[in-house]
Amino acid sequence: MNRSSRFKWSVVLIPFSWLYGLVIWIRNTLYDNNLIKATGFSIPTISVGNITVGGTGKTPHVEYLVDLIKNQYPVAILSRGYKRRTRDFQIVSEKSASWEVGDEPLQLKNRFPDVTVAVDRKRVNGVRELMKPIPRMEVIVLDDAYQHRSIRAGYSILLIDYSRPILSDRLLPAGMLREPAINRHRAQMILVTRSPRDLKPIEMREFVNRMSLGIGQHLFFTTMHYEDLIPVFAGVEPKGLESVKNHAGGILIVSGIANPGTLYEFAKEISEQVEEIRLGDHHRYTAKDVKRIQAKLEEMGGSRSKVLILTTEKDAVKLREMEMPESIRNALYAVRIRVQFLNNDQEKFEKQIISYVASNKRSSILYKEED
């Protein structure tokens, strides 16, 4: 669909956006005025989420938070487990299947084997279940919970993709917003993700001014840093970034995420020859997909030219469950991503988070038991 066609469709869908916006306004008004009660908890709960459809780099930011907290406090991650076939509370293990618990929770468990990861479509029930074991969790990170008003998080972090400014977007279905941009004010912190590395201070100030931050709100800019390539299957050697620079054999990208553009840009830095198999977000792989990957690999020269197949860590947990020919197993690597803060703001961010946790933990003088 070309740009003109997309614009025409957007105009046609505007009345539906108004209707959708009315429903969201009524819902939020009921919560804001306590006509529908939200449940809060007496331990630190940190919500990480967005108000747009599509990827904002949420999982790497959750990983950053957990990495920051886990060595000081017992921390758990609670997710809905999007597109899983089960519905109720489950503890995720490294042996869980992606269809049971969801791809992102399984990715988080693989990244943090010693951290409790759980899924529950009812977040309030999920927190209650996580608080049962003795000793109980001291911090719970709520994955993708910004819009789940039934739970009142102690600290909310809103993610906004730099390339998709929410102030110039429309509500669904004419735009990409799940709720009005004004609702950014519910967040204690806003992280502008996927920011250009060379973003100038004056550009940052202009962005902050446009956001009209509320009292006590904090805003930081982050970008994505690509690390070494991790083999998807056991028995294959990891590859350092330097060892694959100027890779002449070519790169095949296989991804089922909302926004794979940065992965493509990364691959272009490694090789001039980049091909791509792009699938829908949270795609569940089938034998047909494996045949398609194999055919593309052979088309690019296969093992003779040492083609690398790159995927995301989210896709890797699902691809690992598939029966794969040896040629794919030996060539398939996940790209590990870490968050980096711009403007030397890492310390400021971490201080805000640890301060919130320390002030609300059970041993704090500010801590109060639940009624």
Image (cartoon, helix red, strand yellow):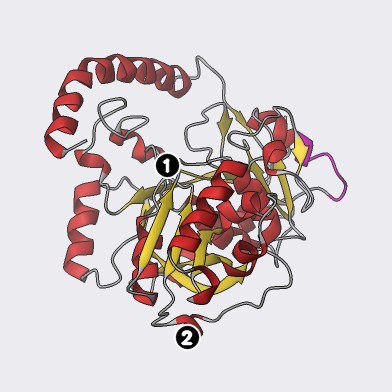
Residue stretch rendered in magenta on the structure: 129-135
Q: Residue 58 appears at what percent x and percent y?
A: 48, 50
Viewer-nearest residue: 87 or 51: 87
**Residue 177 visible to the viewer:** yes
Q: Are marks 1 and 2 in contact (CB under 8 Å)?
A: no
What is the three-letter code of the residue carrying label 2?
Glu
Residue 270, position in %: x, y? 39, 76
CA–CA distance between discs 1 and 2? 34 Å
Q: What secondary structure is the stretch in magenta mostly built from? A: loop
Residue drawn at (42%, 45%) of the image? 258
Residue 137: give its label: none
Whether 273 is among the magenta residues is: no
Quarter the C terminus occupies:
top right
- How many numbered badges does the structure rendering display? 2
* Image point (24%, 55%), residue name: 208
Name the quadrant containing residue 23.
Answer: top left
Residue where numbered disc 1 is placed: 50
Vertical position of residue 321 compared to residue 121: above or below:
below
Residue at 42% x, 43% y is 187
Mark 1 or mark 2, earlier in chain: 1
